[in-house]
Amino acid sequence: FGCLLCIPYIIFEYLTLNDSTLISNLETYSVYINGGILIVVIIISFFIGWHMVMAIGGADMPVVVSMLNSYSGWATAASGFLLNNYAMIVGGALIGSSGAILSYIMCKAMNRSFMSVIFGGFGATPSKTRNQEDEGPKEANTIQTPELAKLLMEAHNIAIVPGYGMAVAKAQHVVASLAEELIKAGKEVRF
């Protein structure tokens, strides 16, 4: 607990599982007044929420958190309509729309489709179980400077992805000057 895999955690036949739990949840709403059924609805809803979020990879979790925030806003707005409370309607609409807009902006920044993040598990194969042996740490691929220079000069489009390693190495200025030189050489450089 506390660690999240970067790959989606997919249970075998998860689409059928999601559909059946959603249908059973909707079935229990018809007898919602009974107190015992309320506990069943809460448990089924918890499972649906857990399973739908776990099917999305760890790298997309900030978008998922933002979308869950948005969903809470829309639920608040719907409750405001039921209770005829204008403050809840306005507040819920603000939270819901701001969460949805933030999620969309985050997806654009990550070059990801909004739908591919929200429905992240669709089309993925079931992941290995947690009991199977992990392959352990991987070796980093190293490259020599002349080899890198040759690859950069042969490339037409170059994408530089700044990250934690660049910040720790304090290489921002060096990378910026490298990008300027590549642009002067007629290369298309993107960050």
Image: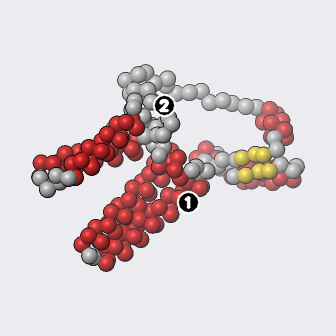
From the viewer's perspective, is the residue at label 2 or at label 1 nearer? Answer: 2
Residue 181, visible in the rendered structure: no
Q: CA distance from mark 2 to mark 1?
A: 28 Å
Query: Can you identify the residue that label 1 sits on?
Result: 105
Q: Amino acid at mark 1?
A: Ile
Are circles 2 and 1 on residues that touch, CB within 8 Å? no
Q: Mark 2 packing: few (<14 Cα in 10 Å), some, or many (20+)? A: some
Q: Which residue is disc 2 drawn over?
A: 125
**What is the count of numbered marks?**
2
- List x then y, in percent, for residue 17: 34, 36
Q: Quadrant of residue 75?
A: bottom left
Q: Amino acid at mark 2?
A: Thr
Above or below residue 189? Residue 9 is: above
Q: Secondary structure at mark 2?
A: loop
The image position of residue 120, as x and y in percent, is: 48, 43
Q: Residue at the left extreme? A: 35
Say which of 50 and 45 sits in front: 45
47 to 190, vertically: above or below: above
In this rendering, position of residue 72 left or right of residue 98:
left
Q: Residue at x 51, y 36 (%)?
A: 123
Please report whichever mark, 2 or 1, sits nearer to the chain's N-terminal start.
1
Q: Residues within 10 Å of mark 1 (few under 14, many from 20)?
A: some
